[in-house]
Image (cartoon, rainbow, N blue to C red):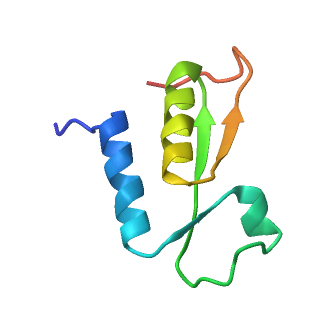
């Protein structure tokens, strides 16, 4: 089975590839309200944080450094029950 790489380094590579490809990252709110939708190459970045909020913070710091905005949804403890 192939292992998936969810490291911060790979996320940075993804973000840089999106920016290099001319994509405009948007928050969910910006997309739904039509803000900054002039570019045809849009991507809505949304993160569901079920656990490990420290990892989400590092992602947000990276996005900030790159000038990227995104949306983070934090689930309350015990509201998420993985089935695996």
The quadrant of the picture occupied by the N terminus is top left
Q: Is residue 6 left or right of residue 65?
A: left
| Whether residue 6 is visible | no
For the C terminus, give its image quadrant: top left
Residue occupying image coordinates x 42% and y 55%? 15
Give percent across and percent down for residue 37: 69, 78
Q: Check the image and name the residue furthest to the right.
A: 33
Q: Is residue 43 visible?
A: yes
Please state the horizontal and vertical placement of residue 31, each as a whole percent of the image: 72, 67
Is 49 placed above or below 43 here? Answer: above
Q: How many marks?
A: 0
Residue in the foreground of this view, choosing between 26 and 63: 63
Q: What x and y, as percent, mark residue 13?
A: 31, 51
- Report the residue that reaches farthest toward the left: 1
Q: Which quadrant of the structure image shows residue 40? A: bottom right
Give the residue at x 79% y 75%: 34
Q: Residue at x 60, y 21 (%)?
A: 81
Asked whether 76 or 42 is in front, the reply is 42
Tell me residue 82's x, y (percent). Answer: 53, 24
Q: Residue at 63% of width from left, 50% of height from top?
A: 70
Q: Is residue 7 above or below residue 25?
A: above
Q: Farthest residue in the top direction?
A: 78
3 sits left or right of 68 in the view? left
Which of the pair 77/7 is nearer the observer?
7
């Amino acid at each position: 089975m192939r292992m998936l790489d969810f490291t911060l380094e790979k996320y940075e590579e993804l973000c840089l590839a999106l920016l290099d490809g001319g994509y405009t990252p948007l928050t969910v709110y910006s997309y739904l309200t039509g803000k900054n939708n002039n570019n045809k190459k849009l991507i809505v970045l949304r993160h569901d944080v079920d656990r490990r909020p420290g990892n989400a913070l590092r992602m947000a710091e990276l996005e900030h450094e790159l000038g990227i905005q995104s949306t983070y949804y934090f689930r309350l403890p015990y509201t998420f029950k993985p089935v695996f």
